[in-house]
Amino acid sequence: MSFMPRLDATTAEWAGLVAELDRWGEAGRVATLWWRDDDAVAATSELDALLRLAGEVPLALAVIPADAQPDLAAALSPFPQVAVLQHGWRHANHAANGKKSEFPSGRSAADVAAELAEGYARLIELFGPRALPVLVPPWNRLAAEFLPLLAEAGITGLSSMGAREAPALPRGIARIDVHVDLVAWKQDRGFIGAPAALGGLVSHLGTRRLGTADGAVATGVLTHHLVMDRETAGFLDRLIALVDGHRAARWAAVAELLTR
């Protein structure tokens, strides 16, 4: 689960996304998007639906290490395009007050280091090379004081919710953020709606194209298969078709983003 910062008031329609991608093409560039889905622990009907929906699109599945079941690895075996990321350790809230976080400021650095290392080792044990050294902190929050612990645990990438002001990462740690969460967490946990989702995509793609955001940072879409409704699935199905059919857009695999 994650919580999305309030989107800008920007909304858009499908034609607006096509127009933005056309501008990328006119500039001789290709816009990259990537897809992260959170909170996986086991083989479920919801996961099956997600994998069918994704098809051949590269998908990054954030798995909770402490709760991960062997049947999840078996369910993923026919899908080589699915990568596994480390979704914290137990997805447990350790914040004494304020916003939820598994790794809030003030926690024991030794405890955090142990959880990071044990979590990565658990995923390697279950998923082998499919497990990539990318941390997805639960609720997209990791206190800056723990950033130096990432490399010690063998982690080389950090994926949170993109923000205008984010702390600099240590050398050797790639930032692989998502930018549009399709779940309306503070409402009914349904779809945020096409206008808001498209507005977020068009806005981030536009800032990349114009150079006010890093143009090499892929625009990230975030889903949660355990709460995905029909409207969200329909939106994704249309988005997949649009990206696959546009000469100036493509889906990027997280392994590619990790090494850029």
Image: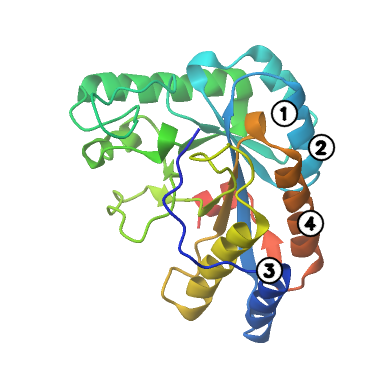
Indicate left or right for 260 with 104 as reference.
right
- Which residue lies under the disc numbered 4? 238
52 displayed left or right of 207: right
C-alpha gap between disc 3 and disc 4: 12 Å
164 and 154: which is toward the camera? 164
* Separation (CA) of disc 2 from disc 1: 9 Å
Q: Secondary structure at mark 3?
A: loop
* Residue 156 vs residue 198, the one in the foreground: 198
Tag on residue 13? 3
Residue drawn 76% across and 40% down?
230
- Mark 4 or mark 1, earlier in chain: 1
Question: Label for residue 256?
Answer: none
**How many neighbours does mark 3 have within 10 angstroms: few (below 14), some (14-19), or many (20 or more)?**
some
The kind of secondary structure element at disc 2 is helix
Which residue is rendered at x = 78% and y = 28% of the image?
48
Count of numbered circles in the view: 4
